[in-house]
Structure formats: C-alpha cells, structure tokens
Amino acid sequence: MIHVIEHRFLRGPNLHSRQPCLQLLAQTEGGGFLEETHRDTFADALLALLPSLKEHRGLNHREGGLIAGLREQGDLPFALAHVLLELQCLAGAELRFCRSQPLPGAPGRHRIAVAYASEPVAEAAVELAGRVLRCAAGEDRLDMPAALKELRRLQARHGTGPSTAAIVGAAHRRGIPVMRLSDNASLFQLGWGKAQHRVQATITDQTSHIAVEVASDKELTKELLAAVGVPVPKGDVVSTLEQALSAARRIGGAVAIKPLDGNQGKGVSTHLRSDEDIARAFKLAQDYGDLVIVEQTIEGDDHRVLVVNGRMVAASRRAPPTVVGDGVSTIAQLVERENADPLRGEGHESALTQITLDEHALAVLAEAGRDAHSVVPPGEVVPLRTNSNLSTGGTAEDVTERVHPWTAELCVRAALQIGLDVAGIDLVCTDISRPLEEQSGAVIEVNAAPGIRMHESPSRGLPQPAGRAIVESLFPDRRNGRIPVVAVTGTNGKTTTTLVVATALMTRGVKVGYTTTEGVYFGGRRTMEGDCTGYWSARSVLCNPQVEAAVLESARGGILKRGLAFDECDVAIVLNVSDDHIGQDGIETVDDLARVKAVVADTASRAVVLNAEDRRCVAMAPRLRSHVEVIYFAEDPQHPAVQRHLQAGGKAIVLDGDMIVVQRLRWAMPIVDVRSLPFTLHGRARHNVQNALAAVGALVALDESPTDIAVGLQAFHSTAQANPLRFNVFNVRGVQVIVDYAHNVAAYRALAQSVRGVSQGKVVGVVSAPGDRRDAELQEVGRVCAEGFDEVIVYEMDEDRGRARGDTVPPLLRGAQMVAARGAAPVAILDTREALREGLRRCQPGDTLVFGNASDLEDLFAVTGAAQPYHEIPPVPSADDLHESEPWPAEGHALNGQADGQHLTPEATETPQ
C-alpha cells in the first residue's frame, strides 16, 4: 500500500502552486501501482466510500478521469492526493488543486501536494485518507459517516465563519493580502505593515470599544436613540419576576422579554400577554443574565438593516423557523426533514442554521396546544420560535431595494449615534417600503458585530455584497493594503544585497522592516536573532504596523519548508544559482535549485532583477507574467544577454568603467562610482560590486531617484557590526584578516577573486564547508580554495551536519591537494581556533588571512584578543541632509555624456530617430 512518511504545510507560494499546499512524502510498495487484478475492485470500493470521487477529472483531465485512471493504471499516490482533496471538500472547504510525482532517485517515494484551507482539518484528513485507501484495499474497516462528521466538526471549529469569510473573500478579490493571525481565533489581518487593517467577524480595528459597550447595553442604546428622534419601544429593565409582571402591566398589551446583554436572539421571547407566558420567558432570559428587559411588542415583521461607515448597504426581512405539515409526519420528523436541507448546517458555517427543538421551541408549540409528536394537517405552517434570528434557524429575505429612504436615513442615524462603523439595526414594521414613523414601527436593537450571511446568502432575494462594503470602508479609493516589498534570493550574496536595499530606503527616511540570516530588523535595530530567511520571519515584518516597506531575504530552506509569507512582492531579485544544498529536500540538481529560486521571481508584480551573467537566472525571464518588467544586471555591458535585452526595449544595470549605469538602448543614467561604495572596498570586492548592481536594479524598479540611490549605497558599510561575516576586514598586527561566510564553490570562487583585488602579499586561506554537502562538492571547495589562495589550512565546523567528527576534512583536503601548492602544502587542523592560530603564524605584516565559512566572529576574537563589537546596525544619515534629488531622464532622450563621472557606451549616445 502507501504510507505517509512526513507532511508539511506550505503556507504561501511554493514549488507546486501560488496557493497554500499540504505537501506529503509517501512511500509505496511495488512502485506505487496496484496489481492489475486488484484495480477494478479497489476503484469500486473507493467509490462506495466516497461516491463524489466519480466527478474528479484526474487522468487526461476528463470527467471521471480519476476512477478511469485507477482502473487503467492503479496509481495509488494519485488516488491518495484526490482522496485527501475530496475529504476536505466534504468537510466544507472549496478546493481544487492536487498533484503527485515520483521522487527521482528514490524508488517508491512520491511527493504529493494538495491544497488546503484549514491546517487542523487537513491534518486530520491525512490520517483519514490513509484509512480510506486501506479500507478500499480490504485492509481496514471504517465508519465513513462518523469520520466525515468529525471532519466537519473540525471544520466548524477551526474554519472561517460566514461573516469573516465574506470579508476575507472580498479582500482577496480586491487584491488585498490576507493573513490569519492565530489558528485559535478568527482574527484576520488585511493588508501589510502600516497599510493593514484587522477584522474579527464584522468587528474592525475602526470599531469603537465604547460603541460596542453601548450597543451591548440595550437600555442605554434605547435612551441614546430616543434622544435623536429614533423611535424605540417602551420598556424597563428588571431583575425579578415581580418587577417583570409589573412592567408588563404598565406597558400594556403584548410585551417582549430578553436578556439585557444577550445576542443572536438567545433568551428572547415576544408577543407575551399572560402572566404564565411572562414568567416562563423571564426564566429563559435569566439563563443569559440577571438583568432582563421587558418592553412593548411592536407589531410587524422583523427586519435587519446593515449600516457600514455611515451608509445603508443591505436589508433583510427575517422570519422565525417554521415547518409545514403534511398530515402524516410529526413535528419532530418535519424538523428532521428540514434540517436535511444542504443549506442548513450546524452553527454558522452554512447559509442557514439547523432548527433545534429546544425549550423555547417546545414552549412555543405548547402555547399552540402541540408538542414534538404532534401531526400537523397538510399545508399548515407551524412556527417554532418567536424570534427570527438566523442563528436559531430563522430565514431571511433580501429587501434592500424596498427600504424607504427615510427609514434608511434613520438607520444610519442610529448607527452614528451609537458610534459603530459596522452596525446591524433591528427594526420591526409592517411595510419596509413606508417611513417607519407612519406605521408605528420602531428600532428594537442595535448590534455590534452583526452577522452578514443573511445578506450574502439570503433564503430568498438577491445577495448583497456586505463583505465588500466593509472592505471598501477600510480600504477606500481602491487601495490594496500593500506596502513596497522587495524579495531577495539566490545562492550567494542575499544578505548583503538585502541590507544595501534596506539601508538605501532608510536613508530616505522610510521605516523599513527586513530579514536576513542574522535576524529580523526594524529601522536598523534587531528584533529577532537567528537565521530569519523563512516564512515566520517575513510574516513578522509584514505584521508589524510600523513598517512602511519590507526587504526580505528569501532562502531555499524557507521556501521548501513553509513556502513564502507573501502572495506577491513588488520587486524580486535573483542574484545567482549555483551548486549548493544539492541532495537535500528533494533537490537533486542545480536546475532543481533554480526552480526553487524561481518561486520568488514568480511572485513579483512590478519587476524582477536578474543576473544576466547567470544562464539559469536568464532562463527565468520568459516564464514571468507579461506585465512584469525584467531588469538585468551585469558587470559586462556587452554581455549577449544584456544586449539582446536592450535591443528588445529592456533595461539593464551595468558597469561602464567604474560607474554603475542604468542602461537603455538609446540613453543611460549614471548612478554611482563603485569606488565610492565602502562595502565594495573601493570597487575591488567584485562580488559586492555585483550585489550593488542588483540593489540598484531593485531601487530603480521602486522608482527611487538616481541621487537617492547613490546616497543610499554610499551609506552602507559591510562591517562586523552592520553585516557580520560578509567580507569583514580586520587588521591584526599588520596582517589583513578577511572574515566571510563563504561556504560553497561559487562563494569561495568569488571570495578568492575579491581577496586578490585587496591583497598585497601572500594569501593564507583557513577554510571549511558544511558537513551536509556531498563529497564531490567538498572536494571542489578544496580545489577552488587552493587555486585562489597561496596556502590552505582546512578546519572542520563545530556542527556535524550528519557526519562524524573528522569526516568533512578529507574530501576538502583531497581537493586542495589536486592543485600544485604555491607555498606550503595544504594541511588539516580540525579545531577552528587552532587552524586560525596556525594561519596567523604563517602570515607576515602585509599578508592576508582569509577565514572562510565563518559562523561566529568570536573564534577570531578569541585568537586575536580583539573585543567583540556590538551587533546593531548604526543609524544611517538622512538623505535630506546630504543632497537634492535629481530627476530621471525622459524616455527616449539621450544624455549629453558631459556630466562629471558619466561614461556612456557608444550605443547609448546615439541620437534617437
């Protein structure tokens, strides 16, 4: 059969889909295919358990293709994917996506991806799906109705209620990002950072606390409404039955009784006349609170009017739950039949709520001389409650277009008087198309957090977009709740590029939240420590209501483990793709790794900045959405990919001599001389020159001015404080010590090139690499280091990464020994600090020591006796103190090439035709 080895929730865009997915790793027997003689039996048994699977397309995307495919091929992983999808749909979710594929090089193993809506429901569905398949194979027994009932219970508990779902759905349709802030509460964030709003049901972050308190005090509500001319019923608040009877006599006629602090129609009784009825209703109301309202019963129909931000947006006429007799069935049987309607569900998850024959319903029947066992004549309508709330089984008819303008204005006045941004106005009248005052109607209640499913899904009439109205009140003028987001990915250079972009924006006064392998930062101060390049770290930035822009380092591991935290970014940067982490998490080739990095590029909505000198980056361009701009960066302005892009009308960031230039076919704009950028060591640290080019590309895409970009880049220093372990340079008794996180072949190759640019004497490399790399990769690291440095000392990281102590060094040393030594032969010293001491012993003043794969500066400080610097990034200067912004040139106009420091390629100086 098939066994699930592990599963993980990919909460955002991922390798499989732009939507959240549940990813499973499954192990099968026999390659994952049923024997041919068992396929028909298995398919029949599966259909008996889940008849709705017959509608799944599956094979060749044809109707019924899943079952046909099972009969033809017996593909168990594919069956598991569809069963898991269908179980969630039967629980109440609306999902469509699932897929399965074998893992290369792992016989019998398959990766399965299935859309999900609720993690607890999907978690339970995984276990149930396995049982369904075993049951279909005759290896298990299963009470399917009971199992589905439990799954639906989980969905009702953890899913989104209808009011919240309507608001969230409206936000999605507006392109507003949505985040659920807790799995244990229906609290949602719409939008990001400073642009966000929060909702819980129909309570918003604009809802006044005092208004909610007023609305929950029904007597105070009536007093305030009466003060502005809103008609309300006469009544008193009482605490004893004697007081209730006395109040009813003073009011005269029929009265209604309800708890002072009640909601959803709980404990409400109407049309009460006799002392016995009043006593029974009083006892029911006191089940929900000691204080009870006795008030005049207003004759007419019950209506709910929804007011949002000072505007009436929907109205419904509500009716209590009823059943219609057939002359044969008992009332209990009629209720059971009504509850079988698929529109009725438990709680609030369906358009209608199931009817319960509770104490209140039985009392209503008793008043009419009936009970649950009574048989009702054909066609007779039997009311089951005196209140009309949907939460107790009532129905709703849309009457929005029939509300008289004066009544609509009166409802708006009531909402404003109480102070609610979203209010449900309950009123009673005989004809909603006439003014309320003409028919002795009245407002009987004002509700904070009113349910809107009666408007979104009425029993009769047209649905009204109540959720959309609430979203529009929070995000007027078509705002989408987004802040600028830059996502940075690639094999090497991510952290430095992230910091450069963030610093440039902060220099201009923008409040930036950003994530790196060192932590989560806001405004230059670290708020979380550790490798923060995954889902939760990015989410923490996007949740921060102070953040005006986000720059998010997005690493391979986070994408594979949890997906991205954002559905879209404005600008994506893909720096490079090279051999690293191969053989981990199902990534078997560099092309596989490129597909992971491309997940970030695929989310860009404005621009993608790609390395023109990396063929795998260039290959990402054709798959991007058509409206997304591609900006290439390259040191070589004549690179073929750059030239093709310019000829096609594109834009590139290139080096013209030492000047970073924004290049178009017929014009160019100089930005900054790389020799003025501290983190490039006067342009000699070539790997940081490339990072600078990428950062300029992102800032150009964000419409930053040339001068702002230049000042921003000049403000960044790659020091141990600002950018630890990224080409940090120290002076130790005349020896230049360069500390870098380089840990793969490409990073060491770039490091060696940059070190040669800043070194005068001998270069000694103290190097290592993580133990979770393959021997071939470790050997290549050793070889590249021996080629790049004069002498090599190999050490071993303290982390074993799955290898025994000492196992990482031999392949590194073998690789180094493949190159003829220019100085002393390569040696191995396992202990990091001993290796550093030996490296320093080999150096003379003027030489350079390279400490590669460094994971902690304390190793260097312990050896040299240097004090540890503090880890916060120092404040950046304000752009306002440094410069005046310069405009971009008009499209199609060449610059004259005479400005100081400006260098143009011949092509860029051509006069446009």
Image: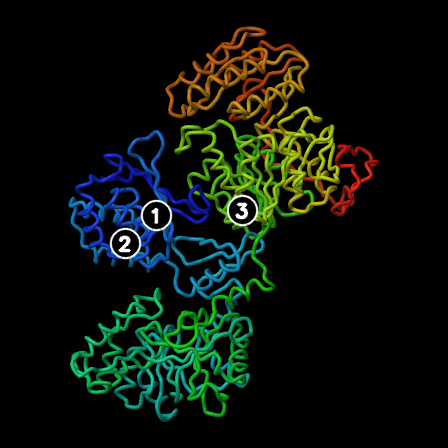
- Closer to us: mark 2 or mark 3? 2
Camera-side residue of 273 and 696: 696
Q: Is residue 178 above or below residue 368?
A: above
| Circle 3 residues within 10 Å: few <14, some 14–19, many ≥20 | many
- Closer to us: mark 1 or mark 3? 1
Check disc 2 and report the residue beneath it. Answer: 53
Check disc 1 and report the residue beneath it. Answer: 60
State the residue lying farthest toward the top: 824
Which image quadrant for residue 520?
top right
How far is disc 2 from disc 1 in space, using C-alphas? Answer: 16 Å
How far is disc 2 from disc 3 in space, using C-alphas? Answer: 42 Å
| Circle 1 residues within 10 Å: few <14, some 14–19, many ≥20 | few
Camera-side residue of 246 and 152: 152
Residue type for callout 3: Val
| Observer able to see residue 157 | yes
Residue type for callout 1: Asn
**Judging from the image, what secondary structure is the residue with disc 1 in?**
helix
Check disc 3 and report the residue beneath it. Answer: 541
| Circle 2 residues within 10 Å: few <14, some 14–19, many ≥20 | many
| Observer able to see residue 857 | no
Q: Earlier in the sequence, mark 2 or mark 1?
A: 2
Percent x, y of residue 825: 53, 6
**Judging from the image, what secondary structure is the residue with disc 2 in?**
helix
